Amino acid sequence: MVLNQLTITRPDDFHLHLRNGASLKAVLPFTMKQFGRALIMPNLSPPVTNIIEVWAYHREIMDAFISEEVIFQPLMTIYLTDSTTPKDIEEVKRSGFVLATKLYPVNATTNSAHGVTDIKKLAPVFEKMAEVGLILCIHGETLVSEEFGDVTRNGQVGQLRRESVFIKETLSWIVETFPTLKVVLEHITTGEAVDFVINAREGVSATITAHHLLATLDDALGSHHYKCMPVLKEENHRQVLLAAATSGNPRFFAGTDSAPHAKSKKETACGCAGCFTALHAIELYATAFEEMGAIDNLEGFLSHFGADFYGLERNQKTLTIKREEWIIPTEVPFGEGEVLVPFWGGKTLSWKVDWKSCLFLMFTKHSKMKNNQNLYPHKGCRFLILKNSIKYYFYQYIYRIIIVKLSIHIFWSM
Ligand code: DOR
Ligand code: ZN
């Protein structure tokens, strides 16, 4: 019998880029419509690297749209750099609203110039993360390698091999050296990644995007709008990803990696990397699951496995999708006169989120929200922010006095 409607636990997106300012306001409603929570990536420019910055970013997101009437929770991450210390880890953990850190190898993707140059040097940070229970989310690509000469050109690893070199050279080391550290290999794209995650020790999982389940390298070679990092791979890899996502194995769960870039920035000589899927993420995943005849396993992948891995309660509300044809818009506003081109813009989808269930969720009174410790920094964190701000203003004050004294001295000695 053909299934025409499906009601599932409200899903979570465990990998989302919102940006900030007008762009944030333009894209956030799409995610709020479909998801209960989203893990927000910290690769802003400049990146979100410490407790003060993450608090300010969290505040910006909350102020953008989220009122007492809206049930949506942004889960925060911080960006690891060469200068991250175990003390930073302790501080963000104490804040109570940061769930994970994000490891970007330097220059691997959008806004990763401040990423990590020598991952093994972060050992004390990983150790502290394991100790306090902060999860490590990884952009798993190696750009430069001396060891894997057969897939490199002057030490530069080819785009199609970056993920598998990372797994062999770095991920295996992280997973073995820090046996209690929980690790998420983000947006996996290859059979090697699927094999690694299936056979890894406990506490290792992976997110899979809708675009890696639905498109391949051939699409990317034909249009800037399929350019993303890691790049789309060949059909055989897509088939392995589809099998993993739809298998019901809880190590694989949804992380859209919806990464909005203005159309004007995608359609340039080299084009920004990122597919915008927040608009229609659930429908895209449903399309992929239906391709495998596995729509029954959609709920685990979208709504259960990620929450379980992160140690969060599963969402209590539900979301309904219906069998209904609709055409994905070719453009949506992106603030400040810019537009975004959604992934697969212009194509017809056969599943549609039921707006009635979304509106109900978005406007249901949820008066406990303000008391939710996970949404607002707890007292310890507020104290920390206050302390750091006082320190900052104190140094500014001293600095100004020095400048004034120096100027007076120079003036009188002229
Ligand atoms: O395609 C991507 N875009 N991959 C990433 O890892 C980053 C993202 C972005 O921020 O644009
Ligand atoms: Zn991402």
Image: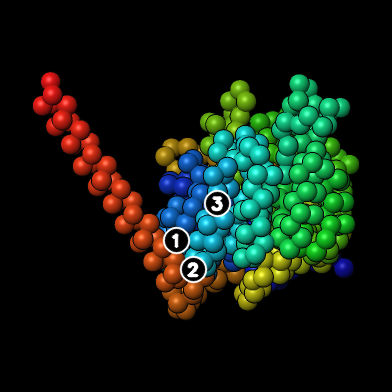
Looking at mark 2, is its residue's CB closer than 8 Å to ligand 2? no
Q: Quick one: SS at disc 3? A: loop
Q: Three-letter amino acid code at disc 2?
A: Leu
Frontmost residue, 319 versus 68: 68
Mark 3 neighbour class, 10 Å CA radius: few under 14, some 14 to 19, many 20 or more: some
User: Whole-percent x and y of residue 370?
Assistant: 43, 74
User: Whole-percent x and y of residue 310?
Assistant: 67, 66
Looking at mark 1, is its residue's CB closer than 8 Å to ligand 1? no
Task: Give the foreground label among 1 and 2.
Answer: 2
Quadrant in the rendering for residue 219: top right
| Residue wearing tag 1 | 62
User: What residue is rendered at 55% in x and 31% in y?
Assistant: 265
Task: Please report contact status of discs 3 and 2: CB closer than 8 Å, yes or no.
Answer: no
Quadrant in the rendering for residue 354: bottom right
Please give the label number shown on residue 85: 3
Q: Quick one: SS at disc 2? A: loop
Task: Give the foreground label among 3 and 2.
Answer: 3
Q: Is residue 294 left or right of residue 377?
A: right
Do we see residue 83 in this rendering?
yes
Distance (Cα) linking label 1 and label 2: 9 Å
Q: Is residue 22 left or right of residue 230?
A: left
Task: Please report contact status of discs 1 and 2: CB closer than 8 Å, yes or no.
Answer: yes
| Residue wearing tag 2 | 375
Q: Which residue is the extreme one toward the front? A: 413
